[in-house]
Image (cartoon, grey):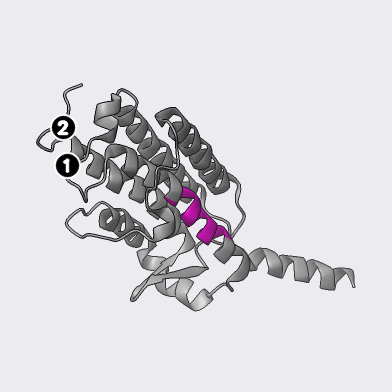
Amino acid sequence: MRNWMMLALFSLSLSAEPLSKGERDQAMSHLHATRKQVLDLITPLSAAQWNFKAGPTRWSIAECAEHITETENFLRGLIEQTAKKAPVDEAKRKAKASAKEAAAKAVLAQMTDRTKTATAPGEIRPTGRFATKAALVAALNERRDTTIRYVETTGDDLRGRFFQMGPGREMDLYEMILMISGHAERHLLQMKEVMAAPGYPKQ
């Protein structure tokens, strides 16, 4: 009986492979770095700069920052739900094993390619949810801290579970973690585009 129980526990440990230290470090480093870059950009902005729009259909820096903040919980929620409910797919894991580093780099490259447009789902579009910049910064920090803590401590098998992001775009859950930080970097670039637009306030 004891041997059977030991074998069962051993099998369970094999079925849920945690992230490697290198994978955790890579994700946490990028999550920390992109948050710092966003905060460094928005902290000194005046109200006029914060709310400036280059056109009636263009987002302000405030709206970009709100979208980053709302997307954090949205994507992490998808990751955590999928980690709990989706079965591990060993065949897909093995198929990606030799190219997983290249796939991770591709996720970050795709997210920061501003030549390709994307439309945000309604639930994460900016609507003026935060009354002040300070309130937004507090929410962004709290949500990013939660994401970093999840990456640092999770035992979920993020490489063996997959999510269909759209037609022909399936990602493992670790790649979706990188997508969170890549998404922040994408909209950081958009903020810089706002700052470079004609009419952007000098102060």
Furthest toward the bottom, the residue is 91
* Contact flag, marks 2 and 1 (Cβ < 8 Å): yes
Range drawn in magenta = 71-80
Q: CA distance from mark 2 to mark 1?
A: 7 Å
Asked whether residue 91 is drawn in magenta, I would say no
Residue identified by numbered label 2: 200
Foreground residue among 194 and 56: 56
* Residue 109 occupies quadrant: bottom left
Q: Quadrant of the N terminus?
A: bottom right
Residue type at mark 2 is: Tyr
Furthest toward the front, the residue is 56
Say which element carries label 1: loop
x, y percentage for residue 5? 83, 69
Residue identified by numbered label 1: 54
Q: Residue at x 34, y 76 (%)?
A: 167
Say which element carries label 2: loop
> Left of 74 or right of it: where is 35?
left
x, y percentage for residue 151? 53, 48
Furthest toward the left, the residue is 198
Asked whether residue 79 is drawn in magenta, I would say yes
In this rendering, is residue 123 above or below 191? below
* Residue 136 occupies quadrant: top left
Q: Quadrant of the C terminus?
A: top left
x, y percentage for residue 106? 29, 59
> Left of 100 or right of it: where is 6?
right
Foreground residue among 65 and 58: 58
Sooner in the amino-acid sequence: mark 2 or mark 1: 1
Residue type at mark 1 is: Ala
Foreground residue among 38 and 155: 38
Q: Residues within 10 Å of mark 2 (few under 14, many from 20)?
A: some
> Left of 202 or right of it: where is 104?
right
x, y percentage for residue 13? 68, 63
